[in-house]
C-alpha cells in the first residue's frame, strides 16, 4: 500500500498513526512543528494564510521527501473557516513545485469516513466501524492524561516531573505500531502519574479558548499550557478533539447558538461561537482568567475578540488574547504570560477574601 501522511494534530498524532496502521496503511508521521518546518511552510505559502496552514505545508513538504503521495485530511468541519479550502490550495501549491500529491478528503461524517476507508482498504465496514469507535475511546484517554497534567503541573513537588512523564508517553506513542503496545504504555503512564507527589491546595484556574488547531497543538502554541502550570496556574479547556468530532453528532451547535445569541446572531465559522460560549460559562464558574489562542489573521477568532473583551469588561474576569504566526517570539510570549499570571493571581486572592 502507498505511503500516506496527515496534518499533525498535536498529542493525538501518534494515536492516529496507530489507527491507520491497523487499517493496513504505511504511515509517515507528520514531522513535529520545528523552526525548520515553520520556515519551509511559510516560505511556500501565501503570506496572509493562517499559521496552521503554513505549519501543515511544512510537514507535507517533509513527508513528500520521504516518498508520500497521499495525504488524508478531514475538512468541511468548521463552517465558513478557510480550512475547507486548504486541501485544494495545498495541492495546487505542491503541484506547481512538481510535487504531485493526492488529497483524500473526509467530511466530518461517520458514514462518509467508513465509505472512503472501505474503498481504500477493502476491509469490511464492521471492522472499520469498530476501529473508529476504539479510536474515539483512545482519544478520550489522551484527553484524560492531558487533564491530569493540567492538575499536577502547578501542584507537583518536584517541578518538571509531570512534563517528563507526559513527554516520554507521547514520544513512545509515536513509535509504537499496535493496539497491544498501546495498552501497555497506557498502563505505565497512569502508574507513573499516580506516583507524582503534589500539594493538596487550590490554585487559580485559567480557561483556554480559541481556534482548534492552535489550542490543541503544544508546539504551535509554544507549550503555553506547560508555561501556565509553571507559573502556578491550573489550566482547563473544553476544546478537544473528541468535542470537535462529536459536537455535530449531538447537535451541540444548536444549543451553543441559543446561549450566545445576545452577543452574536450569526455564525462566523471556525470555533468563534464556541469561544463566546466557553467564556460565558467560565466567567460564571470558579475561574480566575481566560486565555484566547488564535492564529494571526484567523477571521472567526478575530471577529469574536471584541465580544470576548465586552464579556471581560462586564464580568471583570482577567482576559488575554494571544495570536501566533511564524514571527512569534518565545521571550515576548513568556513576558505577556507572566504579567497575565500576576493579574490572575490577584483576582483569585480578591475572590477568596
Image (tube, rainbow, N blue to C red):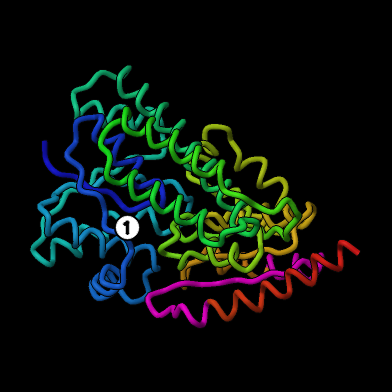
Name the side, left or right, on which 278 lies relative to 270: right
Residue drawn at x 58%, y 54% is 267
Q: Hey, which residue is sitting farthest right in the picture?
A: 353
| Relative image position of residue 339 (x, y in whole percent) | 66, 79
Within the image, what quadrant is residue 313 found in? bottom right
Secondary element type, mark 1:
helix
- Where, quadrant-wise, is the C terminus in this rendering? bottom right
- Where, quadrant-wise, is the N terminus in this rendering? top left
Residue drawn at x 29%, y 37% is 18
Q: Which residue is mark 1?
A: 86
Magenta span: 307-333
Magenta stretch contains residue 245? no
| Relative image position of residue 19 (x, y in whole percent) | 31, 34
Name the side, left or right, on which 138 lies relative to 103: right
| Relative image position of residue 198 (x, y in whole percent) | 64, 52
Within the image, what quadrant is residue 14 found in? top left
Magenta stretch contains residue 332? yes
Within the image, what quadrant is residue 135 found in? top left
Residue drawn at x 66%, y 57% is 276
Amino acid at each position: 500500500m502507498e505511503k500516506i501522511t496527515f496534518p499533525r494534530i498535536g498529542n493525538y498524532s501518534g494515536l492516529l498513526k496507530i489507527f491507520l496502521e491497523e487499517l493496513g496503511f504505511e504511515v509517515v508521521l507528520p514531522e513535529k512543528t520545528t523552526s525548520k518546518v515553520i520556515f519551509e511552510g511559510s516560505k511556500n505559502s501565501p503570506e496572509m494564510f493562517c499559521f496552521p496552514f503554513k505549519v501543515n505545508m511544512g510537514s507535507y513538504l517533509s513527508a513528500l521527501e520521504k516518498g508520500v503521495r497521499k495525504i488524508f485530511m478531514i475538512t468541511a468541519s468548521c463552517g465558513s473557516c478557510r480550512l475547507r479550502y486548504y486541501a485544494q490550495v495545498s495541492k495546487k501549491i505542491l503541484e506547481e513545485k512538481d510535487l504531485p500529491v493526492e488529497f483524500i478528503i473526509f467530511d466530518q461524517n461517520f458514514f462518509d469516513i467508513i465509505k472512503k476507508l472501505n474503498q481504500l482498504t477493502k476491509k469490511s465496514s464492521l471492522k472499520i466501524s469498530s476501529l473508529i469507535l476504539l479510536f474515539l475511546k483512545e482519544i478520550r484517554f489522551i484527553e484524560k492524561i492531558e487533564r491530569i497534567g493540567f492538575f499536577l503541573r502547578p501542584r507537583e513537588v518536584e517541578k518538571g516531573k509531570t512534563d517528563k512523564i507526559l513527554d516520554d508517553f507521547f514520544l513512545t506513542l509515536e513509535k509504537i505500531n499496535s493496539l497491544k503496545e498501546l495498552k501497555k504504555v497506557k498502563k505505565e503512564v497512569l502508574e507513573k502519574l499516580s506516583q507524582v507527589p503534589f500539594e493538596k491546595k487550590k490554585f487559580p484556574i485559567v480557561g483556554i479558548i480559541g481556534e482548534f488547531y492552535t489550542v490543541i497543538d503544544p508546539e504551535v502554541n509554544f507549550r503555553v499550557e506547560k508555561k501556565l502550570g509553571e507559573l502556578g496556574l491550573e489550566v482547563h479547556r473544553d476544546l478537544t478533539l473528541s468535542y470537535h468530532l462529536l459536537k455535530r453528532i449531538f447537535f451541540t451547535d444548536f444549543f451553543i447558538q441559543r446561549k450566545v445569541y445576545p452577543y452574536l446572531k450569526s455564525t462566523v465559522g471556525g470555533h468563534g461561537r464556541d469561544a463566546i460560549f466557553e467564556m460565558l460559562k467560565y466567567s460564571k464558574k470558579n475561574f480566575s482568567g481566560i486565555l484566547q489562542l488564535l492564529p494571526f489573521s484567523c477571521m472567526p477568532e478575530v471577529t469574536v475578540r471584541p465580544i470576548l473583551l465586552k464579556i471581560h469588561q462586564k464580568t471583570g474576569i482577567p482576559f488575554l488574547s494571544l495570536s501566533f504566526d511564524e514571527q512569534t517570539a518565545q521571550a515576548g510570549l513568556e513576558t505577556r504570560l507572566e504579567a497575565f499570571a500576576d493579574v490572575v493571581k490577584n483576582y483569585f486572592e480578591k475572590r477568596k477574601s
